[in-house]
Amino acid sequence: MLGIKGSANALDLYQAMKALYSQDIGSVLVEGGREVFSRFLRDGPVDELSIFLAPTVMGRGIPAVTNASRRNSRVRFSRWSAMPVGRDILIQAFR
């Protein structure tokens, strides 16, 4: 763990990415739930987003990200692509 704390004892994502980059780490795979994804989209330097969609629905599910309806929390990507991967679909968006 980097030990970089922001407000409310949460990891300061900008400082964490800056520290990783200074160690020649230029890419990070983020795997988590909607709150982790929302924080990275809102606070972190996200330049690529990959989403796998599967043809299976399990229960009602939950929204993928939080606060998506607030205009100031929207993230815009300049280009995107979609391709089949087996029975799933991979959607990639790039800034």
Image (cartoon, rainbow, N blue to C red):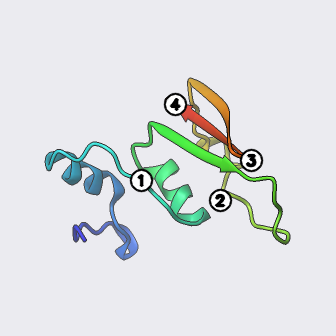
Amino acid, disc 3: Arg
Q: Earlier in the sequence, mark 1 or mark 2?
A: 1
> Which mark sits nearer the N-terminus, 3 or 2?
2
Estimate the spatial distance between the alpha carbons at disc 4 and disc 1, rounded to whole Å: 15 Å
Q: CA distance from mark 3 to mark 2?
A: 28 Å
Mark 3, mark 2: which one is toward the viewer?
A: 3
Which three-letter amino acid code belongs to the residue tagged 2?
A: Thr
Circle 4/circle 3 CB separation < 8 Å: no
Q: Which residue position is annotated with label 2?
A: 66
Asked if the residue at tag 1 contacts the one at tag 4, i.e. Cβ–Cβ closer than 8 Å, the answer is: no
Mark 4 against mark 2, which lies toward the viewer? 4
Name the front one of labels 4 and 1.
1
In the picture of the structure, the residue carrying the numbered disc 4 is: 94
Left or right: 53 as drawn, with respect to 20: right
Return the x and y of residue 88 as percentages of the image width and height.
Answer: 71, 47
Q: From the image, tell me which residue sits under label 3.
A: 87
Q: Secondary structure at mark 3?
A: loop
Q: Earlier in the sequence, mark 4 or mark 3?
A: 3
Crowdedness of circle 4 by 10 Å Cα count: few (<14), some, many (20+)?
A: some
Left or right: 77 with respect to 88? left
Q: Position of residue 8 (x, y in %)?
A: 39, 74
The residue at which mark 1 appears reads as 29
* Mark pair 4, 3: CA separation: 23 Å
Could you tell me how far apart the alpha carbons at marks 1 and 2 are, in whole angstroms?
20 Å
